Image (cartoon, grey):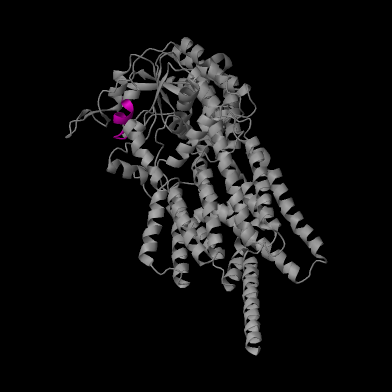
Amino acid sequence: MRNGSFYSLRKLEKKNTTANMARTATASRRNNNSIYNGEMEENQIILKGVIFSGVIFSIYYKTTYPNLPGGDSGELIISANELGVAHPPGYPIFTLLSYIFIKLIPYGSIAWRVNILSVCLSTMTSFCLFIALSRLCKNISSCLLGGSLFCFMSLSWTWNITSEVFSLNNLFVSVLVLLCVLFQLKEKQQKIQISFIGAFISGLSLCNQHTIVIYVSCIAVWVIYTLCKQKIIHKWMIFLLTLCLCFCCGLIPYVYLPLSAHFNTARWTWGDQRTLSGFLRHVLRREYGTFELLKDHQGLGLWKGLSAYNDHILNEWGVIGLGASYLCIISVIRRLRQGKYCLCLLYIMMVSYLLLFTWLANLDISNLLLFGVVKRFWIQVDLVLAILVAVLFDDLICVVKQHGICNGYIQLLKVDNIIAGLITYSLLHVNYQHCDQSKNTVIIDFATQILNSLPYNTLVLTKGDLPSNSIRYAQFMENVRPDVTTFDQEVLTYEWSLPMLKHHYPDIIFPGDLLYTTSGILEDGRQTFNFKTLLDTNYNRPIFACIGVQNHDSSWTEAYELWPYGVCSKFIRKGSSMDIEEYVTETNRFIMEWPYPYNGFDKTSWEHVATQEMWDAKSSVGLLFLEKAEEYDDANITLLLLQYSYDIYHRAMDASKVFPVHWHKNLALVCEKLSRLNHNTHKELIAESIQQFQHFIRYDQSDKDFERIIDAIKSLTKYLESIR
């Protein structure tokens, strides 16, 4: 009887011990999961995350572009629609997703459909960010704060609603961050499963933007170190092989590149990936420079770049936000002392990326357009920094709670919610108008106006991303002026260009296989031709350059000159006679047609570049006449050219209160030269020349001729007083 009682007692104790261990493990898991300390159930967190991401989707959807954005968007959209290959490294996942969205959405412009893809990807990013923060923080207000800091800062907002690859990269970063957080919290066997999923996602992420490789490398080291330290893996060889296999499976989308190149049905594609060398050249970005943003460019150095990023955070989040971005190291150290290394990993990822990218970014950020290019790659840093700042905020709230600084838990809860809400509202209030692109059609208007200004059956040789991508989109996607043929003259300098694209342009006569500085035959039998030969061969039709001419071969300058027709310029054989009145009639319309104000856009945006080009086009003929007036010995022709130049500048300046400052300088020169020939208005022209010079130096004191202009003003003033 005693033995039976003793056995029953031991069994009961064992049962109670097991139950206590289970409760302890559950409590431990809840403590680790922070926000699940009895305060909030998991389904409530997911519901709140869905609501938050739904709000993000609604705002992004309302503010996205109705048509084509600037930059690489036109090329990415065309590549997706025709299943071609985009510029290096090819972006196969974004291309295929864009193709699906183009086919599935039955309304709206094709560009808008791809913009909606970016909105959807950004919405998923906001959800992953919210869920990751819910595991790191104890207060829901911190999740709202971190999500808002990232989603509503102007830089990320701008590129989250644009048909660009940055939204997909943000999604990959947020998924990897979430996996890191879960890896820290889960049990041993679950860590192994998360490792395999993370390896696959890492491979996928490298099919988009290669800059994420820094994050992937840091995560890989941390995961393997953690598994080794906790002695979770017993068969390391099998584990590492499986991990590598998962990673390689993530790289499978790159198979799309050689398949697309093999079929070669797209009217626009970049590179020739049909061979292994061509594939590696494209994926490794060797044409741009593997570790460079652009070829043949020079940056300002590490410290200038870091200072620029510091100013970026100051402009986005203000002084408090900038201070928080530095103080977040406190939360990192605090978690380290608790044995939680995930936050430290995020901090190391962010700092490593910022230092390496800034060091390798070879673009001159004093050039505002290039600065805009560099800024886009900061979004990857901003996402992690928003998480760190949110955790710092959460730690501060917890400290306040623990020390009872505020009376009453409910009151305190309201305070942190109010703070997070106010910050969210302020970001929305400050950035909404700037980021609202719902009525922005500048880029498609730019392309359409250029095409509609050209004569019938024109050949347009474009230069640069803005004209090349926008005009190509307008023609291929919206069928604007199909009689006009456009070709990117800079692409001609690549060896793959004609083998891959020539058969899509049967109406262009290519006098060889490769554009070169001289015409001849290479050792492999290919026929080379220079730019002059290309113009000679196709001169039976109007040929225009837009914007500018390639810098690789100047042979064309021997036989041709450029006459401006708006933004584009027509190739004219030297010695051709100019019917001045007919030319003025043909180009007069360019003075009045562009409806957007000068300096009406952010100077780092493509809209600013397009508008600047259009405004320069208003006076381009006047500048040409000013230059040509010096070439003629006939005083009557010189007088006529200067008079037309004077009229063109005056009409352009009278049409708007704000215009390019250099117009004052050019008009001053016209007045001074015209005063020598027009004796009837001699004094008035001298006075106007002085006045225009004075206007110019008032607005621009950085001009290289500033001192000479000052001397000219003094001389002209003295002369005017003498003849009065």
Q: Position of residue 475 (x, y in %)?
A: 46, 22
- The picture quadrant where one finds residue 279 is top left
Instruction: From the viewer's side, name the closer residue of 27 and 564.
Output: 27
Whether residue 68 can be seen here: no
Quick one: which residue is furthest to the right in this view?
407
* 249 falls in the magenta region: no
Whether residue 22 can be seen here: yes
Relative to residue 503, is residue 54 depicted above or below?
below
- The picture quadrant where one finds residue 575 is top left
* 496 falls in the magenta region: yes
In the image, what residue occupies the spot 35% across and 42% down? 282
Q: Position of residue 5 (x, y in %)?
A: 66, 85
In the image, what residue occupies the spot 32% across and 45% down? 280
Quick one: which residue is furthest to the front in this view?
1
Instruction: From the viewer's side, name the closer residue of 161 and 323.
Output: 161
Relative to residue 710, is residue 202 depicted above or below?
below
Provide the residue span drawn in magenta: 494-502
